[in-house]
Amino acid sequence: MDAAGYPHMQGGSSSSSSSCRAADAAVWDAVQQQKRQRCQGSSSNDQVGSSTENNSFQASEPEQNFHCGEDEEEDYYLYDEDEVCYDDDDGDAYEFDETDFNQQLADKFDDLDLPPGVEATVPWLQKRADSDGPGNFKSMAEIDADITKKYEFFKQFDVVEDFSDHYYAKKPVTGKTGKEWTKKIQHDWALLEKDLPASIYVRVSENRMDLLRAVIIGPQGTPYHDGLFFFDAQFTSTYPATPPVVHYHAGGLRLNPNLYACGKVCLSLLGTWSGSGCEKWNPTQSTMLQVLISIQALVLNEKPYFNEPGYENYANSTNGQKSAMDYNDNTFQYSCRTMLYSLRRSPQHFEDLVAGHFRERGHAILAACKYYMEGHKVGCLVPSDDENGKQQEDINAGGSSSSSGANKKSDLCPNRPPSFKINMAVLFEELLMEFNVKGADTKKFCVEKLKKNQQAAA
């Protein structure tokens, strides 16, 4: 007997087996009664005990990890009277059921909010490709191929049922709308479907014609390159007599004089800033397509510092250029944080685009981060490694394709404050982790990180 009054669970020889069975028959009822009393006295808040304390014990099956109280230090297992003492050769050996084990593990993850993509690396969280074939899980190659396929077939313009997370979803159109209003919006839809630039994607709502969501890919050669910038728009009841209202998904960051941290978009075409002539909204000519292209070309530009009213007067001065470079440094950091924001909270109906875009451009973004940390200007041309390890110019990573020594020297930023490199190092690590989850090509940077850690540990 142990201190709790239970018989010690030991396997004996064949000569002692019969005596163990006889002794067990005598104490079995007492053991059961004491076990029930211990369980009934346990706290109702005990997650394991509370779910099983009212169940009758089955003598033919062992109970696994049954904790009756918070102060209990041991796990006790109740066996059938014929199994309390046993020979090594008596009875069938317990067979491990992998399917049941994996199901138990999966149950533990049901209420957890895992980062996107993590479940794909855990076998028991992967969805079965065929419900009729148990254990038939998608491989990582199949998951990668699925992401790529969805990204490649992601339409630039499409109609969706609704937007539950749209900024104006809970703000219905006030005022009367008629056939002319509907006709004008449908005309805008037709223009968007036909003439959208390759770097702008749009979704409109079938149930709420007044709602529209667009994403603009940051132009190359700017501090916004490879970023995704989301905008929610609403056509008011007075449209097209008045322009649509537009909200920017800022995530609390102000990365442009025209894009406020609260989401306000400051643009003459929208009537949120003063303007004259063609800069202002024209009910007979202006369209939603014009609004999106204006944001892309006029707002997300190479030197957004000069978007601030009055600052354009200093564009040709040394101090003005220095201020513009400093502004670009901060803007790129905010752009990287916006990438993380989009990866972790992808706007509805754009999840496939976000995953595919950063899977494709992740390597180039990380390369740009490192290049800028080495002292080069934000937005300048970033070299990339070809298959032979030689340096070549990556035209897609920003700016022109010129590679002269003079241009490379002019790309240097010698008076940059140390804080830029420190902040970028933190952002680089976060982006590396997120891009890994999305399946981007990060092998080179992971190898470099491993070598650095090994050198630091040596």
Image (cartoon, rainbow, N blue to C red):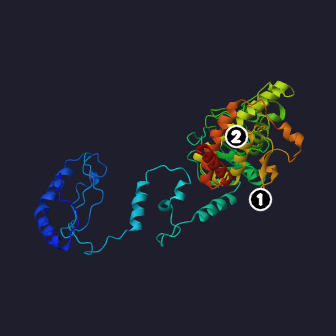
Residue 113 is marked as none
User: Which amino acid type is shown beneath numbered disc 2?
Assistant: Tyr
- SS state under label 1: loop
Residue 344, position in %: x, y? 58, 46
Side (left or right) of 376 relative to 33: right
Looking at the image, which residue is at 64% across and 63% down? 145
Q: Nearer the viewer, residue 229 or 359?
A: 359
Crowding around mark 2 (Cα neighbors within 10 Å: few <14, some 14 to 19, many 20+) is: some
Position of residue 238 relative to residue 69, above or below, is above
- Mark sitting earlier along the chain (1/2): 2
Asked where in the image residue 144 lies, by quadrant, the reply is: bottom right
Position of residue 9 relative to residue 113, above or below, is below
User: Which amino acid type is shown beneath numbered disc 1?
Assistant: Glu
Residue 427: tell me if it is visible. yes
Residue corresponding to mark 2: 239
Looking at the image, which residue is at 87% across and 40% down? 407
- SS state under label 2: loop
Q: The N terminus is located in which quarter?
A: bottom left
Residue 181, position in %: x, y? 69, 45
Residue 152, position in %: x, y? 69, 59
Asked where in the image residue 234 lies, by quadrant, the reply is: top right
Q: The C terminus is located in which quarter?
A: top right
Residue at the front extreme of this rendering: 458
Residue 387 is marked as 1
Crowding around mark 1 (Cα neighbors within 10 Å: few <14, some 14 to 19, many 20+) is: few
Q: CA distance from mark 1 to mark 2?
A: 54 Å
Residue 209: tell me if it is visible. no
Q: Nearer the viewer, residue 8 or 364?
A: 8
Question: How many numbered discs, if any?
Answer: 2
